Image (cartoon, helix red, strand yellow):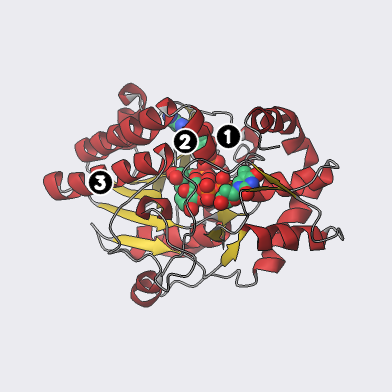
Amino acid sequence: MSRLLVTGGAGFIGSNFVRYLVDHTDAREGDRAVEQITVLDKLTYASTREAVEGLERVELVVGDIADADVVEPLVARHDAVVHYAAESHNDNSLDDPSPFIRTNLVGTFTILEAVRKAGVRLHHVSTDEVYGDLDLDDPKRFTEDTPYNPSSPYSASKAGSDHLVRAWVRSFGVRATISNCSNNYGPWQHVEKFIPRQITNLITGGRPKLYGDGLNVRDWIHADDHSSAVWTILNEGRIGETYLIGADGEKSNLEVVQLILKHFGRPLDDFDHVTDRAGHDRRYAIESGKLRSELGWRPTYEDFEAGLANTIEWYQANEEWWRPHKEATEATYASKGQA
Ligand code: NAD
Ligand code: DAU
């Protein structure tokens, strides 16, 4: 596994994974050492070149995962592919689903054909949203056996990509694993997403914005814990298997907004309710027992409030990174009655 190709490695979670590799896989790691980390990224609006540029052992290749002429020779020069590249934002998929179909479905198909032809190991990064949603009072959580029931164009495209991976494992013997993770938070997340949006609203003198009644629940995990889980599965996961990744971080959106307001010393009712998302999933919750018992993985960020405080401090210290994206993002939300 000494040459790794990371698709979408200039995005939020992919770049966290690349930095995780830089920190944890140098020559001292013996048979876990990685010699070369290549990032393949189209550099869409959601990416940050500086998040991976200049890192030791890392090379950035700018290209589209749906372009076989770029993907096939590149994949053939690597021992494994970790596939993060995707269009990732539900609200955008409601405004225009087409890039989600192209990147998440055609792009994953292109990666699968490349790993099939070159005989290269693949880990496919997916989401808990493929399972649809749970009622607030449902005692169940998602497991690897939960039936697929996606709600949005984004989650349907990710569900389709998971099915493609399983078909290529079964029909062509591709050596792949899949992970489905819950909501990530941490540095470098685009200001369109829930937690960065509320933090940067407060920094810029605005108020947090809650969709609908604000009682929807997400199951939060720090991006570093997602990275350690993916690295564990890549090394120790059983081929053809799916592993759910989660850190027991269920919180309503209202609770998260109030923790952010508390950090800023603002009144706990200092937010607005805005137009709800169409088809808004009510609750996600992950049961990650298989990953923990079979592969011994554990999250390190078990105190959400402390991880959130670090994240808020990161956004306070890195305003020059997010500031240029803030105005246009808020204008898009305003046009939909969500600002
Ligand atoms: P992101 O939007 O921050 O980053 C996606 C990256 O993919 C960007 O750098 C973008 O430039 C790149 N990209 C998009 N289309 C491409 C294409 N056609 N070719 C090459 N590169 C392309 O997304 P993220 O939040 O970091 O999510 C990464 C992956 O993790 C996605 O597969 C997503 O479904 C999955 N995931 C995300 C979460 C979450 O909470 N954000 C949770 C579970 C799983
Ligand atoms: O569950 C994993 C998924 O988490 C990933 O697959 C997606 O790529 C990722 O974007 C995320 O999807 P969500 O739709 O859950 O994340 P988002 O940050 O868009 O919203 C989180 C919750 O907050 C959701 O219930 C909608 C709500 N929300 C969002 C925004 C932007 C608000 O209440 N106000 C907001 O301003």
Q: Is residue 194 left or right of residue 321?
A: left
Residue 296 placement: quadrant: bottom left
Residue highlighted by disc 1? 46
Label 2 and label 1: CA atoms lie apart by 9 Å
Look at mark 3 in the image and give the residue it sits on.
Answer: 163
Q: CA distance from mark 2 to mark 3?
A: 17 Å
Residue found at x 66% / y 37%: 338
**Lower sequence index among marks 2 and 3:** 2
Q: Is residue 316 visible?
A: yes
Query: Which numbered mark, 1 or 3, is in the foreground of this view?
Result: 3
Quarter containing the C terminus: top right
Near-viewer residue (13 or 141) = 141
Sequence-first disc among 2 and 1: 1
Dot 3 falls on a residue whose secondary structure is helix
Q: Which numbered tag is attached to residue 166?
A: none
Q: Residue 87: which disc? A: 2
Sequence-wise first label, 1 or 3: 1
Q: Contact (CB < 8 A) between labels 2 and 1?
A: yes
Q: Is mark 1 within 8 Å of ligand 1?
A: yes
Res. 60 in view = no
